[in-house]
Amino acid sequence: MIAPVLEELAADYEGKADILKLDVDENPSTAAKYEVMSIPTLIVFKDGQPVDKVVGFQPKENLAEVLDKHL
């Protein structure tokens, strides 16, 4: 399950990055806009623009590497 990993990342990156969750069932237009076809999909935004996307479950370490590239 991705939720515990996201909670850990939110704590680790507090003050550096915001980690947010979006329910695609409740927000289908947003999911379509960002071409979310599988769950989980993590999208990294920088200055309001998507700069990276990770599809499928990944370990915390892999997600941290993706985030670090954009900080």
Image (cartoon, helix red, strand yellow):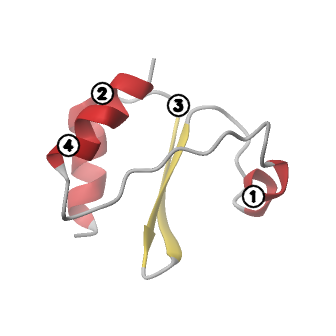
- The picture places residue 40, in percent across and down from the top left corner, at 57, 33
**CA separation in Å, label 3 and label 4:** 21 Å
The residue labelled by disc 4 is 11
Q: Quadrant of the N terminus?
A: top left
Q: Earlier in the sequence, mark 4 or mark 2?
A: 4
Q: Earlier in the sequence, mark 1 or mark 3?
A: 1
**CA separation in Å, label 4 and label 2:** 16 Å
Q: For the residue labelled by badge 4, is the local secondary structure a helix, a strand or a loop?
A: helix
Q: For the residue labelled by badge 1, is the local secondary structure a helix, a strand or a loop?
A: helix
Q: Earlier in the sequence, mark 3 or mark 4?
A: 4
The residue labelled by disc 1 is 30
Left of 16 or right of it: where is 26? Answer: right
The residue labelled by disc 3 is 56
- The picture places residue 3, in percent across and down from the top left corner, at 43, 27
Q: Which residue type does callout 1 highlight?
A: Thr
Left of 58 or right of it: where is 29? Answer: right
